Amino acid sequence: MHPVLVIALGATLLTVTGIAFGGTFLLRVAGGHVPANDLQKSFFRAGHAHAGVLVTLGLLVAVLTDAVGASPGWAAAGAIAVLGSAILIPAGFFLSVLGRDPQRPGAMIACVWLGAAALAVGVTISGVVVLGAGIGALA
């Protein structure tokens, strides 16, 4: 596994603590201890859910591409793109609804779209290198 990817995976594992803290934040919002309008509640839930799912997917992609013997550089590129989406998408959801009573998402919603692009690129790269490893093993 590429050393840059190993470092990224270690850092990613540490982010799970932050995701868990985000869960306690959602409990405080749901309990009425943190004031939030319906838009904020929806976006906070979406941000938290995407963080957990995309971190898990990024870790899986990294392990899978390594397990099949994919090119370390391409495997790292795909996994890091997926892990990048795990930062961008939740950040877009959380940061686009900051303020007292936002009625619509702010400019930071662009991070959701950037993250979606990173996710698409990452899973495409990873899918191609896994397929290539499988096809190469047939020869």
Image (cartoon, rainbow, N blue to C red):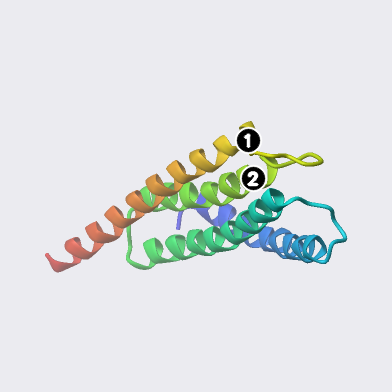
Q: CA distance from mark 1 to mark 2?
A: 8 Å
Q: Quadrant of residue 53?
A: bottom right
Residue 127: which quarter of the image? bottom left
Tell me where residue 108 appears, x and y as whole percent.
63, 35
Indicate the amino acid at tag 2. Answer: Ala
Residue lying furthest right: 33
Q: Which residue is mark 2?
A: 91
Q: Is residue 28 above or below residue 75?
A: below
Q: Residues within 10 Å of mark 2 (few under 14, many from 20)?
A: many
**Amino acid beneath label 1:** Met
- 31, 19: nearer the viewer: 31
- Where does the image place residue 42, in percent across and percent down from the top left? 65, 55
Q: Are marks 1 and 2 in contact (CB under 8 Å)?
A: yes
**Residue occupying image coordinates x 78% and y 41%:** 101
Q: Which residue matches tag 1?
A: 108
Q: Residue at x 56, y 47 (%)?
A: 89
Give the numbered dot on residue 76: none
The C terminus appears in which quarter of the rendering? bottom left
